Structures are given as structure tokens and as C-alpha cells.
Amino acid sequence: MIDDLWLFIFLALIAEILGTIGGFGSSLFFVPIASYFLDFQTVLGITAVFHVMSNLSKIALFRHGFDKKVIIYLGIPSVLFVILGSYCSKFIQPIYLKIALSIFLIGISILLFIFRNKTIKTTKWNTMFGGALSGLFAGLLGTGGAIRGAVLSSYNMKMQVFIATSAVIDLAIDASRAVVYYYNGYVNIKYLYLIPILLLISILGSYIGKIILSKMSELQFKNAVLIFIFLTGIITLYNILFR
């Protein structure tokens, strides 16, 4: 059993709430948090399962409309490249994946903050490239939602359509990589007791996130989420280098 299980549950809930608010998905926060409690390959397996449940919760709560065109152009490359990234992850030492994750978190938070008032040009090829990139990062590092969020933001969708569309794409990504992670041996049966716990967390966290979103401005939470991403990356990198 995980040491400090209640702390793990609390932090996983926070990750789910922030993931719902930011629209990136909880894995952006859950992966570095879970890495403090589990080895990185197990984290990848658990994250994929957790994210499947998380996205089902978001689809149920934010089900008022999907952008089918974006789902196709962004989703298909994402699924193809997440399979590639998931397969390649077993050939890379976990320590390098952790370092890459921390640098990714720091870099993406800075870029999203600097270009927070700019959007990616909404072309089919940009959307497909963004999908491929987010899928590859999701397979290798367990998280690519920030890249997908940056692409989706260029479409100026309504909040509920944005979250629902992202959740549908993410569900396909996570279902695909969960299968590959299972064959890679990342799904450790001794941690299967976490699945019902994470199911409850995904439902509760998504619901709380939806309530908060209805009461606060999008800009306030976008800035707060970017700061949290940056600090998570700094702390993760510090623990790798100095522990």
C-alpha cells in the first residue's frame, strides 16, 4: 500500500479539480504528484486508468456539445502518436523521463503565460500537428494536455464545448495508451485497489471544478493554473537533482 495514502488522495483530488478548471486534464498535475509515491512507469499506468475515468466524468458533466471536426483532426493524430510514445517509453530510463517531464512543465507554463493573449492559427495542419505532439508527450511523459489545450484555445470555443471536446479526445488517448502500458508491464496489480478510489476522486474533482468555474473568471484561473504548473515543474526538477 502507498505510504501516506490520505495525502495521495488529497493531492489527486486537487489535481483533478485543477485539471478541470484549466481544461488541460488532470494528468498534467497528477503525474508529478504521483511520482513522489510510485515509480515512474507505474505512475504512467495508473495515470492512464485514472484519466479514462476522469474524462468520462467530464463528458457527463460538460456534455452540451462537441466539435466533431476538431475531434477528428486533433484526435486521430493524438491516438496514433500516443501509441508510438507509449511503446517507446519502455526503452528510456525513467530518470530521463522525469527530467523531461519537469522541463516540459516549466517550459509549457512559461510559453503559455508569455503567449496567453495569442492563439495558434486554426488550420487543419496546425491542428493535426498539435494533436500528434500532444499524443507523443502523453505517451512518453504521461501528460500532453497543455499542448492540446493550446491548440483548442485557438478555436475560441465556449467553455463547456472546449472541455467536452478535450475530454473526448483525451479519452481516446488514454484508452489507447492504457492498453500499451498494460503490455509494457506498467499496470501493477498490487495498486489496483487505487482504481475505485480514483474513480470517486475523478467524479468529485470534476464536479467541484465545474462549480468553481461557474463562479470565477476564466482569466483568474488560467493564471493560477499556469503558476501551479510552473511550481510543480520546479519542485519536480529540484527533487531529481538534489535528493
Image (cartoon, rainbow, N blue to C red):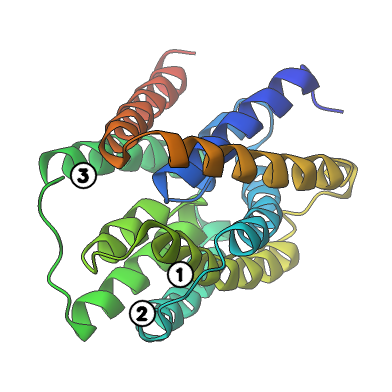
Of the image marks 2 and 3, the number of the one nearer the N terminus:
2
Percent x, y for residue 194? 82, 41
Residue at screen point 49% across, 43% down? 19
**Disc assigned to residue 4:** none
For residue 215, above or below residue 3: below
Left or right of residue 136, residue 199 in this image: right
The residue that mark 3 highlights is 112
The residue that mark 2 highlights is 70
Q: Looking at numbered disc 3 in the image, what kind of residue is underneath it?
A: Leu
Secondary structure under tag 1 reads helix
Of the image marks 1 and 3, the number of the one nearer the N terminus:
3
The residue that mark 1 highlights is 165
Distance from disc 1 to disc 2, alpha carbons, whole Å, reads 8 Å
Mark 3: few, some, or many residues within 10 Å (few <14, many ≥20)? some
Extreme residue in the top direction: 242
Between 236 and 61, the residue placed more toward the observer is: 61
Percent x, y for residue 125? 21, 83
Left or right of residue 226, residue 81 in this image: right
Residue at screen point 44% across, 78% down? 75
Question: Would you say the residues marked 1 and 2 are in contact, meaning their CB atoms lie under 8 Å apart?
Answer: yes
Percent x, y for residue 109? 26, 38
Residue at screen point 35% across, 34% down? 221
For residue 190, above or below residue 173: above
Secondary structure under tag 3 reads helix
